[in-house]
Amino acid sequence: MPDNKKIDVIGIDVIDQPLSQEKQQYVKKADVLIGGRKHLESMTFFKGRTISITRDIPLLIENIKQALEQELRIVVLATGDPLLFGIANTLIDHFGINAIEVHPGISAVQVALSRLGIKTNQAVILSRHGTHDDDLRKILYHPVSVILTSHAHSPGEIIHELMEKYPQTRLWQGHVCQCLGMEAETVQSANLEQLVDIKTFQTPNLLVIENPVADSQAQASVDFGRPDSNYAYDGNMITHPEIRAVTLSKLELSNGATVWDVGAGSGSVGIEAALLYPHLTVYSIEKNAGRFKNIIANAKKFKTDNLQPVQGNAVDVCLTLPQPDRVFIGGGGENLAELLACCYERLTDNGQMVINTVTIESSEVVNRFFKQIQKEIECVSIQVSRRHKLAGYHTLKPDNAITVFGIKKISNI
């Protein structure tokens, strides 16, 4: 060990194997041995001073500081790879890399993936263990995700959160790997919709999720602004291709976001958003039963598994859906002011909201609402003219002008 290394962190293999001779020598030479209760109990040959790792990390750091001041030799025991969301990261943060020597072991992640026969280089590792609260949207981008769990964040709770935020994951394959390396080792595999119903798992455990579309949908489709004839729609209740293209640009979409398409009509805006960004989660909200059926038919036609049609009154529905990062409101209505208030309130910070209106009255409602809450809103008027026959000649006949409002929610403004 180099002279400037004051703390040795020893990774104990998850699989049930004796500590190597080299690692045993570090433990034997220690003045202070630190670790979890089970780890300390397994070191029957060590007779020196021990310190148990508890949730009181500040106290542990203070004890280590005191031992260092006394120039004592410190060894810390950890499970598997101590740098994989482990104690070594905490020690480096407090004492610096020059004070730490890490001796890794085989981690639970390695064992789980080897049991399942899954390539380690395909996996992203996330943690909901201890103080970690990783963003679960990362599972949308990777073929395999390994999620470290805890009592506070069990596999069932994590799966429930995933399916609520990203309904397209419900049929993805999941594996709960329990008590790895122990006699009670168990691996339960099923789709997430089935695993979420299992109330208890043995601990310790971790969750592995396989994403079947990470590779096939890695590239976004560039086919948007499709002709109206591509969609089933009722009367004129569709956002026409040119307006659809501008609307999508104003939404400033990005993969992993949650999108509400409110008053979706045919669902064309939400469907093209879902196709452009396969890792979006889109909720297409429509009250009218006939139009709602059109959304279902159109979503099925375009195979947008990341789009979920929702039937009901927009204000009522929007109070129950996962919080949106983007909101599109495609028209007016008697309750437009109430709908604007509900959607803007629930929109995430830095989220984008776009409202399209046709009538002067609806535009006035939008302007009045944002003036009342003292927010500046972008406003663009678009009018598209189409070729039209007239007395043996052709002219351009204008569609109704559309006013497109856009606003980014920034809390400190």
Image: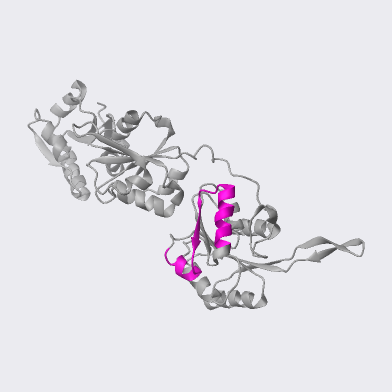
Q: Nearer the viewer, residue 57 or 116?
A: 116
Q: Is residue 413 visible?
A: no
Residue 299 shown in magenta: yes
Residue 53 shown in magenta: no
Q: What percent of the width, then of the height, locates residue 37?
A: 14, 40
**Left or right: residue 153 compared with residue 311:** left
The residue located at (11%, 35%) in the rendering is: 41
The residue located at (17%, 33%) in the rendering is: 73
Q: Nearer the viewer, residue 25 or 289?
A: 289
Query: In this picture, is 57 found above or below 40?
Result: below
**Left or right: residue 74 compared with residue 369:** left
The residue located at (63%, 57%) in the rendering is: 232
Question: For the magenta stretch, what is the residue range?
Answer: 291-320
Residue 52: image quadrant is top left
Q: Nearer the viewer, residue 175 or 350?
A: 175
Determine the residue located farthest toward the top in the rendered image: 21
**Left or right: residue 395 compared with residue 22:** right
Query: In this picture, is 181 found above or below 152?
Result: above
Quarter of the image for the N terminus: give it: top left
Coloring applied to the structure: one colour
Q: What percent of the width, then of the height, locates residue 274?
A: 56, 51
Residue 189: image quadrant is top left
